[in-house]
Image: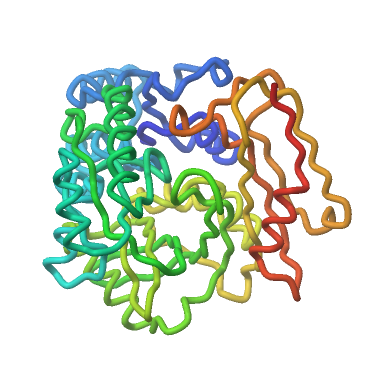
Amino acid sequence: MVVGTTRDYIDHIRNRMPGRAVFVTDPDTITDSTRGPFTDDDELVCPLGDEQAAIDSLRNFLEQRNVALKGVACFDCESLPTAAAIAERWGFPFPTRQSVYYCRNKYISKRVWASRGVPCPRVCSARSVEDIISFMEEVGTEIILKPLTGSGSELTFRCDSLEAAADAFGIIVEGLAARSKDRMYCLGGKSVGSNVLCEEFVSGEEFSCDIYYDAEEVEALRMARKYLREEGPTGTAQAYEIQAPLPEGLEKAFFEHCLVEAAKALGLTRCLCMVDFICRDGRPYFLELSPRPGGDCLPPLIGQSCGLDIIGLTLDFAEGKSPKIPPVSAWEHLVGLRFHAHHAGLLQAIRPLWGEWKRNIRDVAWLRHPGDRIELPPKEYNSWLLGYAIFKPRTGISIRDQVRRLNQAVEVDII
């Protein structure tokens, strides 16, 4: 049972692994551009915000089709609570509801980590500008403001002054009010309201990895270095580089110890997890740990690099199988580059002018097409992502410079 994922993942599983899974999908993932055709043989569309109603609908759906489940898988943060409830109801291994709550609540997760000695930024939960002022005086450095829950850079701001923090707080509160019914911004079935996370800004290189955690043993499945956009929303990933080596100064044994303690502190047992962290002075400062594999362009990037289908591996894992990861020698050094719109309006054309870089391009996918309406953050964070390209980096040129050149090679017409 795949809980609450998006149309692209459903299509991937149906095309690559026909008959492998059934899906329970929330109507909020269905847009005009993804509206069909659907089959009701393997997919139940129902609101996932009401867990008990979803369980009742799912039970009827499975009984009517005489389907017996083998496990539960989930790829999206906002659907993890419902996936945990379904797994509990059918008796399948999955992170508990409490563990999912801890993982999704970025304030609680960091407070728990700090109490266990796991390195992470200092945080506070702010309901007013006065709370933010007190926190900035305490940490004496720049801060990050973001929702208690969320994904990527949505409603995330880096603030170096009280004025900037006050402005950002207002934008976040307004944005959360507009998203009050969005499952991404709900905890325990309720909107997070005007509760905002204040986080100490930690400078350093940012990384993302998928890990396999079981019985206090951990294995990194992939390691990606993140290259953040130089302009635009704080924390927006411009590119991912894999396989990236461990950051300089970070010892493997210490990193694995920190991963184990981070997962154990959140009550996790056997799970696949995505972990975001910043490395500074040989220490990994954890930003997020979520019991699902990494998204964005990472699945196709991993597939191009070593042939591993991380989506299929997640289904294997849900069935109780141990993950089989290609050896280090099988991974090709590749970069996944994300393209963003520079202004809002009606998309007219996307013209990639690769030139001499064409031979380096391994894959390209455009998520937006002529005629699509483009909005920019903080109003909306989905449509401004135009697509991605996967390329083989050249030697002798920094990855950041190559990312910049290829990004500039794509012309976009928006009116």
Would you say 245 lies left or right of 113 here? right
Quadrant for the C terminus, please.
top right
In this view, which residue lies farthest toward the left?
115
Find residue 227 and report its horizontal and vertical position in percent. Answer: 55, 59
Above or below residue 58? Residue 390 is below
- 398 up-or-down from 164: above or below: below
Q: Is residue 310 visible?
A: yes
Q: Is residue 107 left or right of residue 365?
A: left
Residue 96 visible in the snapshot: no
- Picture quadrant of residue 4: top left
Residue in the image at 37% along x and 81% along y? 282
Quadrant for the N terminus, please: top left
Q: Position of residue 221 (x, y in %)?
A: 45, 65
Tell me: 395 left or right of 73.
Answer: right
How many badges with numbers are in the image? 0
Image point (88%, 51%), residue name? 355
Residue ranking furthest to the right:
356
Q: Position of residue 156 (x, y in %)?
A: 37, 44
- Residue 78 at x, y = what percent? 32, 36
Compare residues 206 and 220 and report the one nearer the observer: 206
Nearest the viewer among 75 and 105 is: 105
Q: Residue at x 43, y 69 (%)?
A: 204
Q: Residue at x 31, y 44 (%)?
A: 163
**Colour mode of the rendering:** rainbow
